[in-house]
Image (cartoon, rainbow, N blue to C red):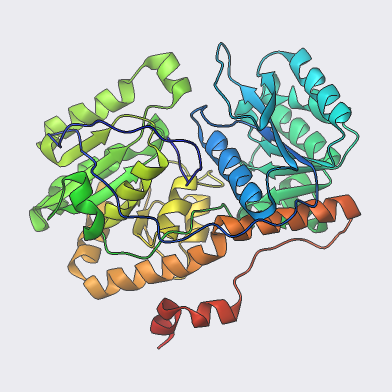
């Protein structure tokens, strides 16, 4: 499921009107912002990572980053080396100029030869242990070692307790990379403390988000055929560590106070999970909803959601919930998206959520605690003023994270890597920009 805005081509949807577990979309309001004019691309950059239409969070991130770079600097200097999962092939856009087979070690060496021959100025590597072959993704080292240009690596996972293979691979990636990009202060701290990376080599650039308007949920609810309902939303690729069952268990108590509530779970089962066990986790969630008597109030969108659908789904939410089960999650594209849309968020305190929702930008609840989720949801739904204040604080924080600003920060990181600069790149909101925003003035009043 796509976690961010993207410029991939969308096909018309033909969906039934909502029954117990489906929802229909109708035409959507026109976008409110036009792209910024592009500037000449100062570097020839090759991005290595997953890419849409492959269905995973890294593919969505890579696609959105490339879209943002092309919007800011034009398409001429950008290309992609995409990593294919086993027994898979994809109809990539033209900017994907080379494909790596995940488990074929020779493919990584061929990719390095291709990049060197193409004389690109810099390689931007999107790193997640699981997307590369070998122990702890060690095949990627076969790509990095022969490269003759600087490398900037974006780390989508930074582990606090890596095993010996993970530690070795990360150590070699850090050594070969001219700069390392992380998306949270926590990840930067782990890089310094656990892996011994000098602070001057680390750039903190937040997860990018589309520049969405701050609107009331009712504007979008009719498009989902849930007009008049209180919408609770979770979206993301389904797997058993997401903790969606905790939110379902919270629903009876929420309904006792807000009887018009529905809980929408949007997203397909993660492709790797589906290959191993099919839709077992979704089946378990549906069975739990039946057992609790809330089957009609739990709505599943069982597919990889397009960018247009994403805007409607997130826009319709009165509350956004991430009930993940484990603290060791360094980033969440879905949480960043919801924050950027100005949603009132309830989340368990995994690392990224604890940092992003600090200073009153959301409500944190204990892991695997349906009662805490229910209490937080009821409190927010009962108090319009408090809910709106949380929404506005979230939205203002999101203005730092829009893709145009993130693309500019990546370009500064790339230029620093080329120049051997030791000054970290860190994206911060300007006081003037926040104070000039009507929401900012309202909050500070």
Residue 150 rendering spot, x and y as whole percentages:
86, 42
Q: Is residue 343 left or right of residue 441?
A: left
The front one of 131 and 255 is 131
**Count of numbered marks:** 0
Residue 305 rendering spot, x and y as whole percentages:
37, 36
The front one of 54 and 36 is 36
Q: Quadrant of residue 340?
A: bottom left
**Is residue 125 placed above or below 383 in the rendered structure?**
above
**Is residue 154 placed above or below 99 in the rendered structure?**
below
Observer able to see residue 153: yes
Hey, which residue is sitting farthest top in the picture?
A: 87
The front one of 273 and 192 is 273
Q: Is residue 169 left or right of residue 368?
A: right
Query: Where the C terminus falls, by quadrant?
Result: bottom left
The front one of 27 and 83 is 27
Residue 229 rendering spot, x and y as whole percentages:
14, 53
Please tell me which residue is depicted at 56% across the width and 47% down the height of the picture.
330
Query: Where the N terminus falls, by quadrant?
Result: top left
Residue 105 rendering spot, x and y as whole percentages:
75, 15
Q: Is residue 365 left or right of residue 6?
A: left
Observer able to see residue 324: no
Please tell me which residue is depicted at 23% across the width and 43% down the height of the picture.
26
Q: Quadrant of residue 296?
A: top left
**Is residue 78 placed above or below 337 in the rendered structure?**
above
**Is residue 14 placed above or below 71 in the rendered structure?**
above
């Amino acid at each position: 499921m796509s976690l961010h805005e993207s410029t991939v081509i969308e096909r018309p949807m033909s969906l039934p009107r909502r029954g117990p577990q489906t929802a229909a979309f109708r035409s959507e309001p026109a976008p409110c912002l036009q792209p910024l004019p592009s500037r000449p691309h100062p570097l020839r950059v090759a991005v290595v990572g997953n890419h849409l239409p492959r269905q995973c969070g890294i593919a969505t991130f890579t696609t959105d980053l490339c879209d943002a770079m092309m919007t800011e600097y034009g398409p001429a200097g950008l290309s992609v080396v995409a990593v294919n999962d086993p027994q898979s092939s994809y109809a990539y856009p033209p900017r994907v100029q080379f494909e790596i087979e995940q488990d074929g070690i020779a493919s990584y060496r061929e990719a390095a030869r291709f990049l060197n021959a193409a004389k690109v100025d810099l390689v931007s590597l999107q790193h997640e242990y699981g997307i590369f072959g070998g122990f702890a993704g060690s095949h990627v080292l076969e790509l990095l070692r022969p490269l003759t240009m600087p490398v900037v690596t974006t780390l989508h996972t930074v582990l606090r307790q890596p095993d010996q293979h993970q530690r070795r691979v990360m150590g070699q990636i850090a050594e070969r990379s001219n700069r390392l990009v992380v998306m949270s202060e926590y990840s930067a701290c782990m890089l310094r403390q656990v892996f011994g990376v000098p602070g001057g080599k680390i750039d903190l650039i937040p997860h990018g988000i589309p520049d969405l308007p701050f609107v009331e949920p009712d504007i979008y609810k009719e498009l989902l055929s849930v007009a008049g309902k209180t919408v609770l939303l979770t979206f993301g690729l389904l797997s058993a560590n997401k903790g969606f069952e905790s939110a379902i268990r919270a629903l009876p108590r929420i309904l006792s106070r807000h009887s018009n509530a529905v809980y929408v779970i949007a997203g397909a089962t993660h492709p790797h999970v589906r290959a191993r066990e099919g839709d077992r986790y979704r089946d378990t969630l549906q069975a739990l909803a039946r057992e609790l008597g809330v089957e009609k109030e739990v709505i599943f969108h069982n597919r990889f959601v397009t960018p247009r659908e994403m805007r409607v789904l997130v826009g319709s939410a009165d509350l956004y919930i991430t009930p993940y089960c484990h603290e060791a999650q360094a980033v969440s594209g879905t949480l960043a998206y919801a924050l950027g849309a100005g949603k009132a968020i309830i989340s368990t305190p995994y690392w990224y959520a604890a940092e992003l929702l600090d200073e009153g930008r959301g409500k944190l609840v204990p892991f695997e605690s349906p009662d805490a989720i229910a209490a937080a949801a009821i409190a927010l739904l009962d108090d319009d003023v408090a809910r709106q204040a949380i929404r506005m604080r979230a939205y203002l924080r999101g203005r730092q994270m829009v893709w145009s600003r993130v693309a500019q920060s990546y370009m500064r990181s790339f230029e620093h890597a080329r120049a051997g600069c030791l000054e970290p790149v860190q994206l911060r909101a300007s006081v003037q920009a926040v104070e000039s925003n009507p929401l900012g003035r309202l909050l500070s009043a």
